[in-house]
Image (tube, helix red, strand yellow):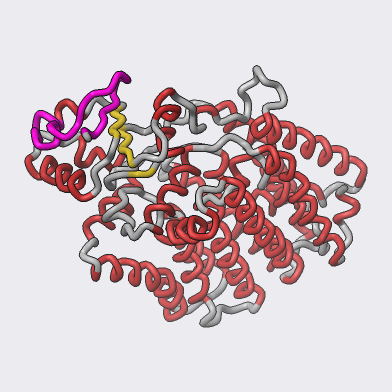
Amino acid sequence: MLSFFRVNAISQLISLLALLVLIRLPFLLASPPLLMPELNWMLVGEQISQGQLLYRDIWDSISPLSAIIYWLMDVMFGRSQTAYYIAGTAVASFQIFYFNYIMNARDVYPDNTYIPGLLYALFLNMSFDCSTLSPMLLSTTFLLLAFGTLIKQMERHGATDDVFEVGFYISLATLCYLPSALFIIWAILSLLLYSGASFRQHSLSIFGFIFPILLTVLYYYLNDSLEDFNRNLLASVFRVRQYNLTDFQTLFASLFLPLAMGVLGFLTLFRQTTRYVNFQQRCQQIMMIWVLTGFLSIVLMPFLAPMMFIGFIPALSFFSAIYFQSFRKHWMAEMIFIGVFVLMLIILYQGALRLVPRLGLGRLTALQVKESPVTRHIQNEKILVIGQDLSAYRYNQVATPYLNWDLAKYDLRNLDSYESVISVYDQFRKDPPNYIIDRENIIDKLFQRAPALAAKYEKTATAGVYKKKE
């Protein structure tokens, strides 16, 4: 397979994109498990399409540009998991094409091949959740565009005013996934160390980064929602930790092979320092700063799952390509690649299709939307779920802004405060749920503090479930 993609021809690009589709086709047809983050994104898009304002009427920590994209997905496809996977595959195809184009057009490697794109396509399938249209996937698209613009500056032996685009792309990445804001550090360090950029050009890149964010802040200021924007997005990055993921075995299994190949590629550089010209060495150093920045972003992740590490894939593919192109005996590189390819597909299909029913590896069980007696008896209703498990929303609509439990705590865990009780009462009055599903034992205290609400609801036969009186 490596030998085929060593040839630099348009047919290889078509084959590469076809390979990506073929890898994903089995579980696209079989419908992989729906994950709670996916359901969360669908609910946000659905609420925005109903006229709700993100952060003010929808308490969630999703970044605004991703929310706009999910709104468009809802307008066009509704709650379609298949649409999310097809859109995710389209975005992945662009990333593969652009990544390989940059590697060849800028002569980042001594030889122009489609091996970097092949590895990128493979690593994007390290787990089935990487196939969906996640904020991290969207963000990585803009980070790649920033990388392409940045190394174009390196190639010119001096920065130009195009560095504005670097900051601008990183800003768009941030508006898709907030922790990507750390990559402005990567851009500043890269420009400072390798481009000879002037103070004016550094200022341009920083302004390019700040400008879209300022426009977003201005929008929420004009809608009298700046406090909501700050609490639910900016401040949330330090305190929101959604969906307790205990499946570290899956996380390790998915990341191990891409990480191992990337590390081996990096170590290979110490044996081949004379093979690369100065520009190529600077690209390698820029990618190392990318990796270090990615590690810093881990502490800001709202939850841990393979999809959250998509931002590492450009760097891992970059260094892995160095490793596979370093072999003098091509047959040996071919054998190692085939082994990696097969093992990664086994992990992928085990997670998506459950090849071995009793084996939980790759399933991301803790993140899956689960069936429950509540969802079987309550459907097509406006409900409020108090707690992290959003499964009950699968066949229902969201009432009140309290979608994200970590943010809802701001009111619902603070019922000794008069302001919080008034806030909760107002939210119930504006958008009353037909059912309340209380997983955190909050409602009894709320009803004590707000008897007017208690008069409107009654307990059902199911523990923790309250129904609005007729």
Does residue 169 lie above or below 404 as drawn?
A: below
In x, y percent, where is residue 427? 20, 47
Residue 390 in the figure: left or right of residue 93: left
Magenta segment: does it hold 199? no
For the question of whether residue 185 can be seen, the reply is no
Q: Tell whether 30 sits left or right of 228.
A: right
Residue 70 vertical placement versus 461 (above, below) = below
Residue placed at 66% from the left, 40% from the top? Answer: 126
Q: Is residue 278 above or below residue 19?
A: below
Residue 147: give x, y in percent of width and height: 59, 65
The x, y position of residue 335, in whole percent, is: 87, 38
Above/below status of 142 relative to 31? below
Relative horizontal placement of residue 202, taking residue 364 as reference (left or right): left
Identify the residue shown where x is 24% and y is 48%: 431
Asked if residue 252 can be seen in this view, the reply is: yes
Name the spot of residue 27 as percent of width and height, x first.
69, 39
Which stretch is magenta?
446-469
- Quarter of the image for residue 406 reads top left
Name the residue at 80% across, 61% down.
Answer: 13
